[in-house]
Amino acid sequence: MGRSEIRTRIHRNLKHVFETYAQVDPWRWSDIRSVRWTHGEPWEVESRLSIEPANSFGVIVDQVITHFEPYRRVDFISHFGGVTMISQIVFSALGDNVTEVRSNLEFVGTFSRVAVWLWARPLSTERGDFMNF
């Protein structure tokens, strides 16, 4: 299976970082064209999000929330273009104004073998480097 882990340190407190993440509307600052809840209440287990990235050539990401612990962890399964990816986002306070966000991503199915070669290797954190924001 294709796996990747990405760690990012953000110079803001845990509460601010998590609450910003949990507001899907601000995601539009990125390359995401639209985000909407399609099933269930926001952030409840088994609720669904529909995400349309910009320049995605019509591919829509369908995400199902599988675990939600406020200020700690969000797990979900994403389906897009025939690909399935399992994700876990973990939020940890490293200090009063520093939060680490750790993303564990795993492609499952046939595509996972290709994903390791194309995507995960360039994003490897084996060197221990961190992105700071």
Image (cartoon, rainbow, N blue to C red):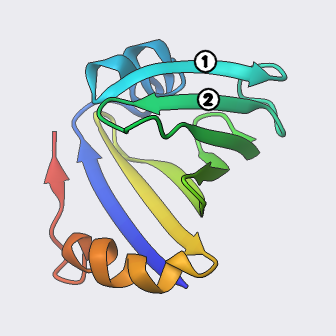
Q: Which residue is mark 2?
A: 50
Q: CA distance from mark 1 to mark 2?
A: 5 Å
Q: Amino acid at mark 1?
A: Arg
Disc 1 crowd, CA 10 A, few/some/many (<14, 14-19, 20+): few
Give the x, y percent position of residue 59. 49, 40
Front position in the image: 83 or 3: 83
| Side of 18 relative to 118 (left or right) | right
Which residue shows up at 37% across the image and 38% down it? 57
Q: Is residue 107 above or below residue 59?
A: below
Helix or strand or loop: what does disc 2 sit on? Answer: strand
The first of marks 1 and 2 along the sequence is 1
Front position in the image: 70 or 32: 32
The answer to which image quadrant residue 127 occupies is: bottom left
Which residue shows up at 58% across the image and 36% down it? 71
Give the x, y percent position of residue 51. 53, 30
| Side of 88 relative to 48 (left or right) | left
| Side of 124 relative to 129 (left or right) | right
Q: Residue furthest toward the front?
A: 57
Front position in the image: 55 or 94: 55
Q: Is residue 44 above or below residue 131?
A: above
Q: What numbered label is drawn on residue 80?
A: none
Which residue shows up at 27% across the image and 19% down it? 29
Q: Is residue 19 above or below residue 77?
A: above
Q: Which residue is mark 1?
A: 36
Helix or strand or loop: what does disc 1 sit on? Answer: strand
Give the x, y percent position of residue 121. 26, 80
Q: On the rendered image, what quadrant is the C terminus found in?
A: top left
Which residue shows up at 64% across the image and 40% down it? 62
Q: Is residue 106 above or below residue 80?
A: below
- CB atoms of marks 1 and 2 within 8 Å: yes
Q: Amino acid at mark 2?
A: Ser
Disc 2 crowd, CA 10 A, few/some/many (<14, 14-19, 20+): some
